[in-house]
Amino acid sequence: MGWRTIGATETDPSKPGTSELFKALADNPAAMANGEAGAPRVKDAALDTGVATTAGRDWVLARTALASIGAVGTYALLLHQTSDSLSEGELVAGSSLSYTGLSFDETGAGVGSISSGTSPAGTWQAMGRVNSINATNAATLFLRVS
């Protein structure tokens, strides 16, 4: 089995079908689904069944695990380094953000410190609200979009 290109002359209605043609007609859909060499790729829109499956979830997670830090499609807890507030969904240049971590006091009642690291590349979308009214730095979850 494998992908075989079917020539225009093979599907001429005035000519009889051959066993090779019928074999290709039977095997080609499976070759497409299996991603075999030379076969056309199935478009993403064709895969939308509206139902999440275990196999589909595993496929996505396997590829997500391969993403490097800061790659498009990854999430990061980032520090917004200005006194401006942000709303959910706002786009922010990575140059005004930095990777961050939070440290809580012994009781867990408050944030003891927010540490900052390097600035990520690209454009990031805020996934939460940043209210910087009384602070120059605040952190939230961001998604890299470009």
Image (cartoon, helix red, strand yellow):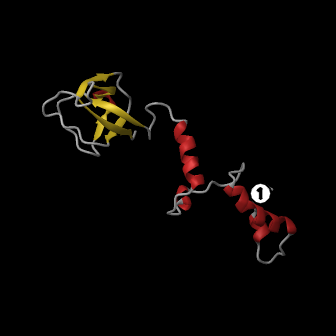
What residue would you read off at disc 1? 4
What is the residue that sits farthest to the left in this orientation? 134
Residue lying at 78% horizontally and 54% vertically, measured from the top left: 2
Amino acid type at circle 1 is: Arg
Q: Is residue 111 above or below residue 41?
A: above
- The residue at 22%/30% (across/down) is 110
Q: Secondary structure at mark 1?
A: loop
- Residue occupying the far bottom of the picture: 14
Q: Residue 131 location in percent, x, y?
A: 19, 37
- Viewer-side residue, 13 vs 32: 32
Q: Which quarter of the picture shows residue 61?
A: top right
Identify the residue at horizontal 50%, vertical 31% (top origin): 68
Image location (x, y in percent) of residue 55: 60, 53
Front-most of 9 and 93? 93
> Horizontal and vertical percent for residue 39?
69, 54
- State the quadrant of the C terminus: top left
**Left-right relation of 19 to 63:** right
Q: Residue furthest right?
A: 19
Q: In the picture shown, does residue 6 fall above or below 141?
A: below
Residue 107 sits in quarter: top left
